[in-house]
Amino acid sequence: MTTFSRRTLLMISALALLPLVGCGDDTDSGATTTASGTVRLLTHDSFLLSDGVLDQFTERTGIEVELIQGGDAGQVVNQAILTNGNPQADVLFGIDSTFLSRALDADLFVPYEAEGLDQVDESLRLDPEHRVTPITYGDVCLNYDKAWFAEQGVPVPTSLADLVNPIYEDRLVVENPATSSPGLAFLLASIEAFGEDGWEAWWSDLRANGVQVTEGWEEAYNTAFSGGGASEGTRPLVVSYASSPPAEVLYADPPITESPVGVIDASCYRQVEGAGILMGAKNEAGARLLIDFLLGEEVQADVPLSMFVFPVRADVELPELFVEHAATPEDVYEMPAADIGAHREEWIDQWTDLVLR
């Protein structure tokens, strides 16, 4: 089995989180223009498109894209807040519902209704005022090592509640919600699952059952998880993504036809990632065209196998590898951005006291 990082997984990480198709007509990604100059795109480190995709934007518009990668999603949002009104970029990509309220409260973005938004389901639209445009989505889910469970004769857990069973003692690794996007998503899933009156007791039981905590996805999946990139891992359960299975198949050496990693559908939390034009952008006209391009068919068709996330456009066909191997849970945990914004730091502090101290 090959080793891959979140940049590879999401390229992913990861989240991040994806084949290249030919150019569509001008309405797919903004009207053809003779504009020139540079538009600056601030993203998290997991942002990656296939070679030549951004070149299509330049060929169509005459505008070069300067890519600025600023760490994880939280760091990128914090950078944008600190430079609000005089931003280091024109467009920010990678903000999701876990940080959306913070950005909107800071008045970071200029409203813009992008071309192609009519192809995006209402459930994926982050902001009715169009300050943030949805671009991709993915599900943070428990992954499991198929071989370990088969060899040990242990049943695969079917819910979050199962994880406190003693048969899963010392078998789970999760990420710290204070430092990791999937870690925060998993915490939010637990709050949705067990409610304000029950999630803390569940985490206390999980700690007593030997849960391991890492600072980020890379260490959890590629080092601690027994089914991931590192053979020395001992934990057959990990917080990762619904798109881990196709990544395992794509990068396996020698080739495989079935993923060694499974997904527990009942554990999944949905993350929608968006892009917005930063207030004070020096090239606002170019920024609008870039938002249209990110929501256009070229980028939307590319994201499954470059960043291992789903396109938000309903009219974009998924690659066969994704259709065959990615999990697509029907019911997922979600939480309104306003609720997250109101309680995020409080919940993280409570979690830290319960699990790490």
Image (tube, rainbow, N blue to C red):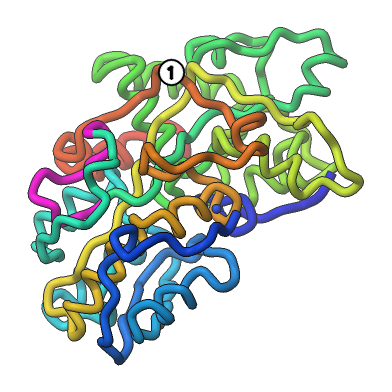
Between 108 and 121, the residue placed more toward the observer is 121
Magenta stretch containing residue 280, yes or no? no
Q: Main secondary structure of the magenta part?
A: loop
The answer to whether residue 352 is visible is no
* Viewer-side residue, 186 vs 206: 186
204 with respect to 61 (left or right): right
**Of helix, strand and loop, which one carries label 1?**
loop
Packing grade of label 1 (10 A; few <14, some 14-19, many >=20) is few
Which quadrant is home to the C terminus? Answer: top left
Picture coordinates of residue 99, whole percent (x, y): 26, 50
The quarter of the picture where the N terminus appears is top right
Residue drawn at 20 percent across, 83 percent down: 283
Residue type for callout 1: Glu
Residue under the image location 57 percent in, 10 percent down: 158
Residue at 41%, 81% (x, y): give it.
58
Q: x and y percent of residue 108 in the render?
A: 14, 65
Q: Which residues are magenta?
A: 122-133
Residue labelled with disc 1:
330
Q: Is residue 151 above or below residue 281?
A: above
Looking at the picture, does residue 78 appear above or below residue 218?
below
Query: Furthest residue to the bottom?
Result: 37
Question: Observer-nearest residue: 112 or 115?
Answer: 115
Q: Position of residue 276 (x, y in %)?
A: 23, 62
Q: Is residue 62 above or below residue 50?
A: below
